Amino acid sequence: MSAVSSAGISDPRLPVTAAAGPRLGRARHARKVASGLPSWWPLLALTLFAAALRLSTLNLQSFWYDEAFTPVHVLHPSLWATLRSVVHSENTPPLWYVIAWADSRVLGTGEVALRLPSALAGIATVPVAWAIGRELEGPSTRRAALACALLVAVNPLFVWYSQEARAYGLFVLTAALAMLCFLRALRWPISDRSTRGRMAAFALSGALALLTHYFAVFLLAPMVLWLAWERRTRRAALPAIGALALVGAALLPLISAQGGHGTQWIGRWPLVERLEAIPQYYLTGYTGAALGHGIELLVALPILAALAVGLWRMTEPAPATAATATDGAVPGGEAPVRAAQEHAPDASRRLLLALAIAACGVLIPIVLVAFGADYLAPRNLVAAMIPVTAVIAVVATWPPAGRAGRRAGLAGTALVACIAAGFLAISVDVDLSPRLQRGNWRDLARALAHEARGGRDYVITTVELGSTPFEYYLPGLHGLREGGSVLVREIDETGYAPLRSSAGEPPAPGFHPLARLDVDGLIAYRFVSPVPRLVSEATLRRHVITPESAPEVLVPAGARVSS
């Protein structure tokens, strides 16, 4: 039988190379020779670009409360003491803290040192995103892989958490690895050995995700259920599912001991605002609210347009041509097209799987709020944005069908470029605009330390978010115990807008204003007295300049404190 039937459809019994024809092979070879570059150069370029975007500004911003809390209150010289602190003062699994402890033993507890693991995790997520795109679109092209890796490399939310000394960057990486291993586990088994290896990889990556962040369970749940439901993967998946169940069970005592410590702020944040923040975070980053809804809309429009164009292409029937028949060809041409169609999940099915993972990762925590388990903080959903990005990339770059489809394909590619440009512009703007950065407690602490150096007779009042940054940047500071008093000659009141109407007024008799400092939106009022005066902790708390439910009073080591 000839390679191409009278209807113009390639014979699926023939190898892909024969079905594709010599013309397609010569064209591909000519493009490769013309470029002079290996096929993986776009991935290398994107990974290097992601590294430059993250590493070049790793110490640009100050530590904020959560970041400073780790070196001040969690990390200790011994790993055992550090793990005990994780139990009593954190609400996250221990993996990231073990890495941070090892990192601090080698590099110290500076901003670059403690943020470096998150930066490396963020960089590594880019090739993982590329691989996820390849699994979702099939091996015939690299469009979705390129789009997925590009969007992950420049998205301001992923860049932000790649520069934060907390577990979120590692959470994104481990959850992305689990998704990749899950998709590879769905491949038609080549041998029992390869199937066992894929399931072992899924179990390992899923366990690492669970040990990094508890919200990993919402992403792993649809994967586990699918592997258990699918007849051809059920038996091979049982050991992997059992291993994940054991890891989850081992974490239950830790969850109980931590008891939701440090999550009270979630309930104080109105639910409606948190729901609005979920898409806002993805579109414009953690601090993107300051940009306004207009910028959000500018970023959202090309995403919506790309999805619309892609969905239109998905509904268009493919023309019955020989060229179309080879679109699903596997490079190398070893397996027949029919075998690939019979044994590999089709692209639409894989896309629905990615959509299901994203939906579960976002919607299950929202549903749990109705049952009293309110841990819905938008930043806890950051790893769910990987399957969201993958869905956008695959739909936007859906293979075109026919001449009209090819034009739509070019439009989808252009829209992906617009999305990436918007993401990149916001990521760069964060580096240039202090209003989009973490509070600059570092420079405020330096300003106050410069004025108060050499003395111990001062006190700093601040909002809760400023307490651990001050303790980090001004070593020796500690909280004034409740009911105590301190003998001081200077009172520094710090906070941020909106300020109390009493801000700027002396906090205690005998003190007069000396200066007002404004450090990138953080405000400090300095009051001095010609002689030391005894001021109570209650008086200082009442006069914190920012309305805050938990004001803090900090005194230096050696301060003259009385009960």
Image: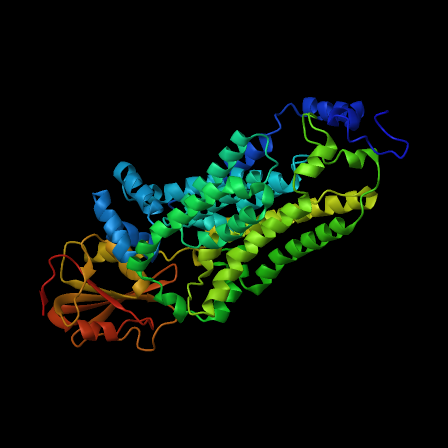
Can you see residue 286?
Answer: no
| Residue displayed at 76% across by 33% down | 326
Q: Nearer the viewer, residue 459 or 242?
A: 242
Q: Seen in the image, is 306 located left or right of residue 284? A: right
In the rendered image, residue 40, in percent from the top left (x then y), is placed at 59, 30
Looking at the image, which is closer to me, 374 or 416?
Answer: 374
- Above or below residue 491? Residue 128 is above
Q: What coloring was used for the rendering?
A: rainbow
x 85%, y 29%: residue:
4
Judge left or right: residue 257 versus residue 130: left
Res. 415 in view:
yes
Choose between 189 and 416: the one closer to the eye. 189
Report the side of 189 relative to 501 (left or right).
right
Asked where in the image residue 6 lies, by quadrant, the reply is top right
* Percent x, y of residue 435: 44, 59
Quadrant occupied by the C terminus:
bottom left
